[in-house]
Every structure is written in C-alpha cells, then in structure tokens.
Image (spheres, rainbow, N blue to C red):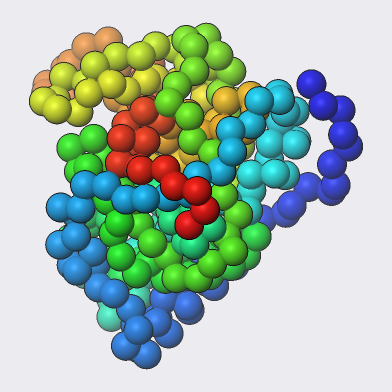
Amino acid sequence: MRTATWGAPVVVNDQAVIGRMLQFAEAELEGGRAVKAGELIGQFDRSGCAVGLAAVSLVPWSLPELADRRRAAVGVIGGLFKCLKCSKWHLAAASGFFIGEKGVFVTCAHVIQSADKEIFVVLTGDGRLTPVREVLAADAIADVAIVRCEGAGFSTMPVVAEAAVGSAVTVFGHPNDHFFSLTQGIISRYFLDPRPKVGEMFSITADFAKGSSGSPVFDQSGNVIGMVANTQSIYYGEKDGHAENLQMVIKNCVSGKTILKLIKPVVGE
C-alpha cells in the first residue's frame, strides 16, 4: 500500500455546484447549442462504440490516494427541467464517470431516459462544465448509457470486468446533492437479475442513495468494476397495504463486464 501524504481535503459547496450547473445549462439552452434529451433518447439504438480505455491499475491505493487521483474523472450529470409549481428551470443531479479523454462518459440509462428533462450537462471533479452532445452506445435493459460530452483532455479511469466477492470497494458519487461523497464496503454477491435480458449484477455494502445512479464503484487499485444502479428495501412485513419495519437495503450495481460489452477498445481515441 502506498503511503504518500495527500493535500488538504477538497471542501465542496453543494449549492455552488447546483448554481454553476444550472447557469451553464440555461445558457446552453438559450444559445441554441444544446442537444435536447429527446434526441439523445432517440440514439439509444446504438449498441457499441470504440474507446481508447485507460490502462488498468495494478498497485493498491490508499483511500486518500484514490479520492485524489480519481476525483477529476468523476462527473455530476445534471438534467435541466421545469417543475409544475413555477416557471423557473431546475436541475436534477445524478452521477457518472469519464472513460475516454475526448468526453466519453458513462452513466445509467435511466438517468438519460427521463421524460421531463430538457438537456443534460456535466460538471467534472476538477471543475469543468460541458454539455452532453450524443449517445455513443446504450443498453436500456442493462441500464447503461455511454455518452459524448463536448471537449477533450478529460481525466479518465480504467474499467475492469469484475472483482472477487468480499473484495473492498469504494463508491464516489453524489447522493441527494451531497456531491463527491466517498463511501466504502465490500462486494456481497454477484447475481442474475430476474428481469429478462439484464444479466449479471452485483451487490455491495458501500452506502449510496438517490442521486448516486451512475457512480463509479472502484476496486482497491482505482479501477472501475461497475457502477451504482438501484436499491431494494427489505421490510419485515406489511400492514394495511404498507410495508413496515425496514430491515435492510440491498445496493445493486451494474457490472464492469456489462459496461465493457458496449465498448470496442482502441489504441488512443
């Protein structure tokens, strides 16, 4: 394990994150530069894309090192929408991560397939703002979308197929607008999702919540082994049609193997 000493912690201003993204998204929309969400959803029939993936890391990292090295490649993806209570624009935030330096970004399909969203923008962990321009590949059933953001020179992270049950994992995401939150746990199991054609998924004990969809799940060497997908709450019983006595929340993730099925590796981009 490396023992390097890392700098002072990054202090996140959650309201400023939302404010910057909202201002940027409104400017993109008003300037006529934005690609509408409906057009992006229309590109979900794209089944694969070529990406120059980052080299796999083989050396274990400390958690401070992982947070420092991977933060820039973690993104907040925001969908611009108007609520039914006012005429102002709002921003719904979710998670994702860059795998290609020319703006190749991975998130959950259900993040993009939101009928009420107008456009999507991304804020990187090192403060860059960029609009989502197209869907490169998607599998709506498996809940994976690979999109292209405008620009180049983005920090990226490697993706590997899997890690062993019991392996330590780290999630870097944005639960309920608590941006760039780091949590740790283990892989508790791999399983076949009962929904037809979804395939292999895995569960972890690292904490996450709404807004974390698309968050990268890392192994101890900073490789992405999957991404946050959904939760399942287990209750002891039901009374008058309402579940009661919450016992456990199962935290499910898309496997790295599923993400890699949409990618044709290339040398460079």
Please tell me how many numbered marks the rendered image carries: 0
Q: Is residue 101 above or below residue 74?
A: below
Query: Residue 68 appears in which quarter of the rendering?
Result: top right
Q: Is residue 120 above or below residue 168?
A: below
Q: Is residue 238 above or below residue 231?
A: above
Question: Could you tell me residue 183's position as x and y percent?
Answer: 59, 31
* Nearer-the-camera pick, 50 or 89: 50
Q: In the visual, does 228 lie left or right of 8?
A: left
Question: In what quadrant of the picture does the N terminus appear?
Answer: top right
Q: In the visual, does 75 lie left or right of 6?
A: left
Question: Could you tell me residue 2's position as x and y percent?
Answer: 82, 26
Question: Could you tell me residue 28's position as x and y percent?
Answer: 40, 82
Whether residue 222 appears in this view of the structure is yes
* Nearer-the-camera pick, 158 or 236: 158
Question: Could you tell me residue 78's position as x and y percent?
Answer: 41, 62
* Nearer-the-camera pick, 218 or 249: 218
Q: Residue at x 71, y 25 (%)?
A: 59
Query: Residue 238 appears in which quarter of the rendering?
Result: top left
Q: Residue at x 75, y 36 (%)?
A: 65
Q: Residue most toward the bottom?
A: 31
Q: Residue at x 34, y 69 (%)?
A: 133
Q: Residue most toward the front?
A: 267
Whether residue 249 appears in this view of the structure is no
Q: Residue at x 31, y 35 (%)?
A: 261
